[in-house]
Image (spheres, helix red, strand yellow):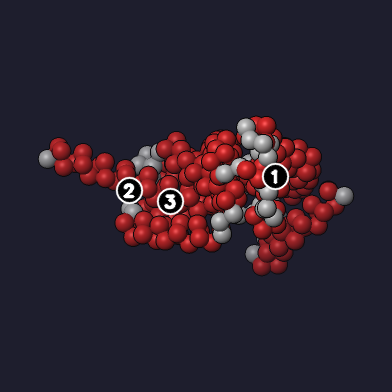
Amino acid sequence: MGLLSTCRDIMPIAAIIIGFQVLIIRKPIAHPKKMLIGFVCVLLGVALFLEGLEMALFPLGKLMAKQLTTPEFLGIANLQQASWQSYYWIYIFGASIGFATTFAEPSLLAVALKAEQISGGAIRAFGLRCAVSIGVAFGIALGTFRIVTGFELYYFIIVGYIIVIIQTAFAPKMIIGLAYDSGGVTTSTVTVPLVTALGLGLAQAVPGRNPLIDGFGLIAFASLFPIIAVLGYAQIAQWLNNRNRSSTL
């Protein structure tokens, strides 16, 4: 069933690519046998990945959130007595999992290496990956705080984008596009499943939270705060360079 649904989802993409190649560009497909084998590998890989999410990552995220919010672990009589400070391990865990999954994100690694290559080393791949990972870590920690406290999501998002707009006006132009893309590459194969599972599990474990309303939204934090982090990283680097230049004059 999973393989059939994956075929149904991916076939339109293949049809568009093949259609443009044959009908618009009007050139034969190079290495059709190799492309067919690759397409089958993609189908199998996506199907197995989605099945793995259902069997492992989503239950694991819910289990971790449940274990970190039990009254015994929090050291209280019942969850109704818990304040937002009682869930500090959830914030630490959210930040840790956000940093680790983002640093290992293949799409971020690809973007960081290309940025270092094109900039001639002015932008370091390691520094960019660290900045994005720190942004995601802070965003996930803040997102779990929002779920625990029940604050409205749009307050955080509006304030965050106001900060981004202000930073954009003062950041180096060469980093702006890369910073905005850095927010998108974090929401990929490694980060999204674990973060989504954590949010849903936490919303189910905290009393008074609705998983449909409160469980989602962590991905928005994971997309927004890397932009702030990368723009801040560029501004700090620019300030340090200007200070070094002025000291040498």
Q: Where is residue 203 in the image (x, y as percent from the top left)?
A: 67, 49
In screen coordinates, is 34 left or right of 103?
right
Q: Position of residue 236 (x, y in %)?
A: 32, 44
The residue pinned by badge 1 equals 205
- Disc 1 crowd rating (10 Å Cα; few below 14, some 14-19, many 20+) is many
Label 2, secondary structure: give it.
helix
In the image, 206 versus 5, the foreground residue is 206
- Of the two numbered discs 2 and 1 on the same chain, state the one appearing first in sequence: 1
What amino acid type should be assigned to the residue bearing mark 3?
Ile
Q: Which residue lies furthest to the right in this view?
A: 1
Label 3, secondary structure: give it.
helix
**Quarter in which the C terminus is drawn:** top left
In the image, 246 versus 79, the foreground residue is 79
3D distance between C-alphas at marks 3 and 2: 10 Å
Q: Where is residue 63 in the image (x, y as percent from the top left)?
A: 72, 37
Whether residue 39 is visible, yes or no, is yes
Label 1, secondary structure: give it.
helix
Residue 217 placement: quadrant: bottom right
In screen coordinates, is 213 left or right of 247?
right
The residue pinned by badge 2 equals 235
Residue visible at 79% across and 52% down?
A: 6
CB-based contact (under 8 Å), mark 3 and mark 1: no
Residue visible at 34% across and 54% down?
A: 171
Q: Position of residue 143 (x, y in %)?
A: 56, 49
3D distance between C-alphas at marks 2 and 1: 40 Å
In screen coordinates, is 112 left or right of 43?
left
What amino acid type should be assigned to the residue bearing mark 1?
Ala
Whether residue 42 is visible, yes or no, is no
The residue pinned by badge 3 equals 228
